[in-house]
Image (spheres, rainbow, N blue to C red):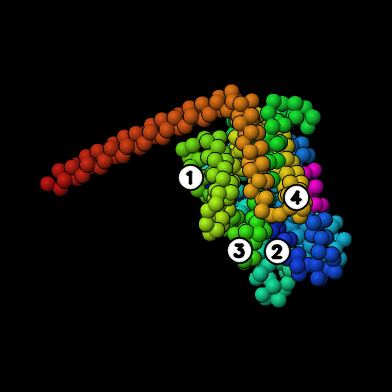
């Protein structure tokens, strides 16, 4: 139970620094005397570091194990946050952006791989909802720091302090991580896991499709969060409504992942993925229909709810698709596709919108969700045999667990009946003696 708490807290910590930059940049720009566009450079450095880190993480996992790697990575992001808070110039922030990206990428791959192998699907959904909690807390910490007069630097120092606390929790829990990874019969020891190269992994059937699946999913989600407010303003809404729609979209994703965790108890990962994509398709179709204007923000919430189960369910299905020995490498490739999609496609639509209009945003969404659906269907078709075998094994394990639970209940009831009979005999014996 303690390890599960640590994992949830670590996912909250992973989301903390992700949203502070965007919220704090207007203050940071004035303080550092940097151009407005410099935030893009900082974001690109972090993203490139994250991609590089995600690709080398499988080898680091084999060398150090999940617990130690996550501990070092969280400590790295804490140090980077301290550097952000005390940076005297923009170029210093660029230097600390490197460890920020490297640490975030390693945490993402290592934690997702551990959750996909060792935890149930419901926990994977709830863990990504926890990331959303951290992402929401980041701007709130900035607002509190600015209110008490500490500015944006105080916000980063507070983030560093919280990450330091999480790193200490990770350090304390290291023996539990080792015990879980060694004791789980489904997980091969790190020394025996196949050291497959990136080039060899990409030749595994379905691996490239997995990359493109995450590429188009991130293109869909990040484009929705980045451009839905601009689209609403172009449709005639006030800017305040556009800003509220962005918050509602993130809230819908977080609520949707909490709900999908409950649905994951009864439904398979791929059913949740298909249901989420279907909801997004409905949202895109409603956007282009000649309906009243107030329906548009509701559609954006619908897009958030549809996106919610797709990412965590795809992650959790990875060991079933490619095997647990290749799971770390597969998730690293998926993370690289996800980060690359979030870097390339939203700015690409911004270029298109600059030449035409933000009104064409639903067309871009339709392209992203259509490409995502094609990739998911092809990926299911290529890996269907492994998925079916894994699902059948999971059902058998569930049945065996239910049988074991029922047998334990019967044993407990027998022991309880025997205890009651002994108690009644003692009472009768005492009554007979008292006479």
Crowding at mark 4 (Cα within 10 Å: few <14, some 14-19, many 20+): some
Distance of mark 4 from mark 1, alpha carbons? 39 Å
The part of the image, by quadrant, that contains residue 115 is top right
* Residue occupying the point 24% across, 38% down: 421
Give the x, y percent position of residue 102. 78, 48
The residue labelled by disc 2 is 23
Q: Does residue 199 appear left or right of residue 413 in this picture?
A: right
Crowding at mark 3 (Cα within 10 Å: few <14, some 14-19, many 20+): some
Distance of mark 4 from mark 3, alpha carbons? 21 Å
The part of the image, by quadrant, that contains residue 408 is top left
Give the x, y percent position of residue 132. 61, 54
Distance of mark 2 from mark 3, alpha carbons? 22 Å
Q: Mark 4 vs mark 1: which is more N-terminal?
A: 1
The residue labelled by disc 3 is 237
* Residue occupying the point 73% across, 28% down: 194
User: Which secondary structure, mark 4?
Assistant: helix
Distance of mark 2 from mark 1, alpha carbons? 32 Å
């Amino acid at each position: 139970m303690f390890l599960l708490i640590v994992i949830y807290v670590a996912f909250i910590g992973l989301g903390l620094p992700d949203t502070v930059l965007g919220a704090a940049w207007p203050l940071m720009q004035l303080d550092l005397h940097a151009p407005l566009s410099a935030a893009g450079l900082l974001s690109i450095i972090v993203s490139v570091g994250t991609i590089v880190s995600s690709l080398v993480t499988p080898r680091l996992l084999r060398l150090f194990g999940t617990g130690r790697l996550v501990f070092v990575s969280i400590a790295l992001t804490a140090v980077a946050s301290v550097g952000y808070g005390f940076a005297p110039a923009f170029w210093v922030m660029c230097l600390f952006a490197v460890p920020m990206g490297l640490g975030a990428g390693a945490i993402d791959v290592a934690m997702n791989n551990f959750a996909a192998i060792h935890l149930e699907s419901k926990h994977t959904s709830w863990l990504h909802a926890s990331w959303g909690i951290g992402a929401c807390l980041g701007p709130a910490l900035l607002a509190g720091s600015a209110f008490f007069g500490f500015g944006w630097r105080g916000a980063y120092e507070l983030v560093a302090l919280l990450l330091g606390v999480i790193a200490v929790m990770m350090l304390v829990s290291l023996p539990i991580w080792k015990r879980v990874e060694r004791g789980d019969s489904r997980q091969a020891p790190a020394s025996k896991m196949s050291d497959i190269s990136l080039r060899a992994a990409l030749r595994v059937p379905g691996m490239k499709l997995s990359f493109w699946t995450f590429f188009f999913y991130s293109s869909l989600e990040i484009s929705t969060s980045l451009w839905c407010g601009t689209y609403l303003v172009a449709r005639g809404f006030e800017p305040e409504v556009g800003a509220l729609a962005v918050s509602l979209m993130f809230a819908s994703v977080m609520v949707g992942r909490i709900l999908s965790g409950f649905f994951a108890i009864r439904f398979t990962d791929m059913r949740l993925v298909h249901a989420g994509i279907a909801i997004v398709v409905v949202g895109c179709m409603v956007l282009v229909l000649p309906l009243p204007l107030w329906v548009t923000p509701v559609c954006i919430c619908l897009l958030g709810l549809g996106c919610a189960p797709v990412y965590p369910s795809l992650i959790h299905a990875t060991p079933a698709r490619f095997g647990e020995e290749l799971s770390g490498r597969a998730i690293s490739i998926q993370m690289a596709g996800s980060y690359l999609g979030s870097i390339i496609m939203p700015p690409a639509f911004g270029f298109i919108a600059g030449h035409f209009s933000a009104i064409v945003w639903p067309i871009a969404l339709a392209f992203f969700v259509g490409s995502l659906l094609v990739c998911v269907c092809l990926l299911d078709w290529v890996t269907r045999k492994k998925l079916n075998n894994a699902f059948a094994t999971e059902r058998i394990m569930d049945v065996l667990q239910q049988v074991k639970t029922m047998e334990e209940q019967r044993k407990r009831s027998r022991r309880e009946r025997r205890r009651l009979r002994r108690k009644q005999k003692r009472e009768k014996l005492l009554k007979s003696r008292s006479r």
